[in-house]
Amino acid sequence: MTVARHSIIANEGKLAVRLSGVVAFALYLQFGPATLPAWLVMVCLIWLYRDPSRIIPSRPLTIVSPVDGKIISVESATDRFLKREALHIAIDMSVVGVFSLRSVTEGKVMQIWQEKDHCLAIWIQTDEKDDTVIVLRPGRWLKRLSYQLVYGDRIGHGQRFGHILFGNRIDVYLPASSRSTIEIGQIVKAGSDGIAELMQS
């Protein structure tokens, strides 16, 4: 097993955390203990943008969860992006979990679709030509979704690539031959918990 390299604070929140710390310290020097609310703001930002380390399974055929959340659907369905029958796994992100996004597998970014409702779909193909599609939706309340991927990028197994503040539903489409390893209602963690296995002939 390997541990994903990362910063304790997600890149998307580093500036906000630093600024809140500077403001809180400056107010403390001026007003003393009365500045407690400013420190609480900084603590809240640290919590929102925390990004703890995750132990990634060493088995390359293991598909890991892209987010922290609860499994709400495991079924055969049509993947409308690649026009194929697929194993579809839906995950409802936790509003109190970590909001980082991680790659379900190692491979190459083949295409990214941006839809009118701000949904984002990312097609990642493994070196063995297994196709995976992750469908992301903006956060529930702030509608925040950020990612750092472009066509042609290589991405590692469980590698962090984005952030969805306050989460939402995430859909994962895998080859129809894939075998799910989770059950509806199961709680999973991004990057470390397997949700399926790719089947090689």
Image (tube, rainbow, N blue to C red):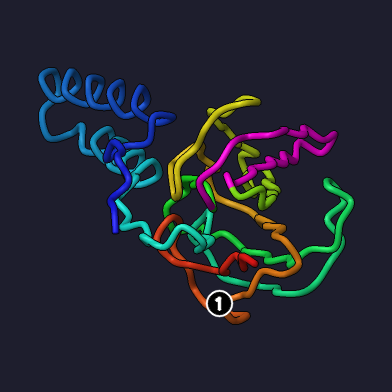
Q: Is residue 147 magenta?
A: no
Residue at (39% x, 61% y) in the render: 192
Q: Residue at (62%, 75%) from the top-left corner?
A: 180
Q: Nearer the viewer, residue 120 or 62?
A: 62
Q: Residues within 10 Å of mark 1 (few under 14, many from 20)?
A: few
Pinpoint residue 109: horizontal percent, then vertical percent.
63, 34
Q: Where 191 falls versus 139 (above or below)?
A: below
Q: Which residue matches tag 1?
A: 181
In percent of width and height, residue 199 lies at 62, 68
Q: Quadrant of residue 169?
A: bottom right
The three-letter code of the residue at mark 1 reads Thr
Residue 125 within the segment the image draws in magenta: yes
Q: Residue at x 47, y 48 (%)?
A: 99
Give the magenta-colored segment's residue range.
Answer: 105-127
Where does residue 179 sit, x and y in percent of width and height?
63, 74
Side of 94 where 5 appears, left or right? left
Question: Image check: 163 left or right of 51?
Answer: right
For residue 5, side relative to residue 138 (left or right): left
Residue at the front extreme of this rendering? 201
- Identify the secondary structure beneath mark 1: loop
Up-down relation of residue 10 to residue 182 (above or below): above
